[in-house]
Image (cartoon, rainbow, N blue to C red):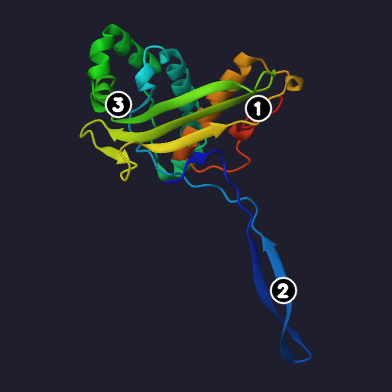
């Protein structure tokens, strides 16, 4: 399975032979060169339009990283809402598609803080049912940080995670079926220099937003001109 890191774009040249009819006879004359721009990337998986919990965990350090996990989950929900609900309004009118309702992350926070020990022993589908979800987009966060480059003031945002979708009724992993551990997603920014005037906390937030974008894009068709593709490499605003 290949690691999905950000947005891959492809330009294809298509050669079309066009017959020309000159002086009453057929000649294979001109060749047209058609460029099909940047082709959008299809969703890896189409989420069912049912109440959905987005749950992010760094399981070995669940208590220490809970705040970052909750922030990342909110960014993922924002992207999914924008691209699966807001951008689909016109299509919904034609296809009568119901919007996906995303469970408020505060419900997950309340359940976790009510009894942390009990929470950590619960299965993903049990947690989903407790907060009213039918499916869970589960993100196992392996790492996410802003790294310093040597002894300089340069830095780089990096992250990696595994993503899966779990049915809250059966407990079955709906996707990816071939890998119980989840679909790998990664991010690495360009090196950020002091001249870009980006603070550590800004770089940290941009890393979270970039990871959220890469994760959420697993579930909708996207292209290079999407509004949420602008911050991939921490370019100055």
Q: Residue furthest top?
A: 114
Q: Give x and y (percent) for residue 194.
A: 73, 19
- Depth check, front residue: 61 or 4: 61
Work out which quarter of the rendered image holds the C terminus and state it. Answer: top right
Q: What element carries label 1?
A: loop
Give residue 132's quadrant in the image.
Answer: top left
**Above or below for 74 versus 221:** above
Q: How dense is the environment of label 3, judged by Cα within 10 Å: few (below 14), some, or many (20 and up)? A: many
Instruction: Name the N-terminal-most of marks 3 and 1.
Output: 3
Q: Give x and y (percent) for residue 118.
A: 23, 13
Which numbered mark, 3 or 2, is in the foreground of this view?
Answer: 2
Q: What element carries label 2?
A: strand
Give the spatial CA distance, label 3 vs label 1: 34 Å
- Depth check, front residue: 152 or 67: 152
Q: Name the residue under label 3.
A: 133
Q: Residue furthest right?
A: 23
- Depth check, front residue: 26 or 58: 58
- Could you say which disc has been placed on residue 234 in the image? 1
Give the spatial CA distance, label 3 vs label 2: 56 Å
Confirm whether residue 99 shows in the render: no
**Image point (36%, 13%), residue name:** 109
- Could you say which disc has been placed on residue 60 in the image? none
Q: Do the residues labelled 3 and 1 touch (CB within 8 Å)?
A: no
Q: Give x and y (percent) for residue 79.
A: 50, 29
Q: Mark 2 points at which residue?
A: 31
Give residue 103's quadrant in the image.
Answer: top left
């Amino acid at each position: 399975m290949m690691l999905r890191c950000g947005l891959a774009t492809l330009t294809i040249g298509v050669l079309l032979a066009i017959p020309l009819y000159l002086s009453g006879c057929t000649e294979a004359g001109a060749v047209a060169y058609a460029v099909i721009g940047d082709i959008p990337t299809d969703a890896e998986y189409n989420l069912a339009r049912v109440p959905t919990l987005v749950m992010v965990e760094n399981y070995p350090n669940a208590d220490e990283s809970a705040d970052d996990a909750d922030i990342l989950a909110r960014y993922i929900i924002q992207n999914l809402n924008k691209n699966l609900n807001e951008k689909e309004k016109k299509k919904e009118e034609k296809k009568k598609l119901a919007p996906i309702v995303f469970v408020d992350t505060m419900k997950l926070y309340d359940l976790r803080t009510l009894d942390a020990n009990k929470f950590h022993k619960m299965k993903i589908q049990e947690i989903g049912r407790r907060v009213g979800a039918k499916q869970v987009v589960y993100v196992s966060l392996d790492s996410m940080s802003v790294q310093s480059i040597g002894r300089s003031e340069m830095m780089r945002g990096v992250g990696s995670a595994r993503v899966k979708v779990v049915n809250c009724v059966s407990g079955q992993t709906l996707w990816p079926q071939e890998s119980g551990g989840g679909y790998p997603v990664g991010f690495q920014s360009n090196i950020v220099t002091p001249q870009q005037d980006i603070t550590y906390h800004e770089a940290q937030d941009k890393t979270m937003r970039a990871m959220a974008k890469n994760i959420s894009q697993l579930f909708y068709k996207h292209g290079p001109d999407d509004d949420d593709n602008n911050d991939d490499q921490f370019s100055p605003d």
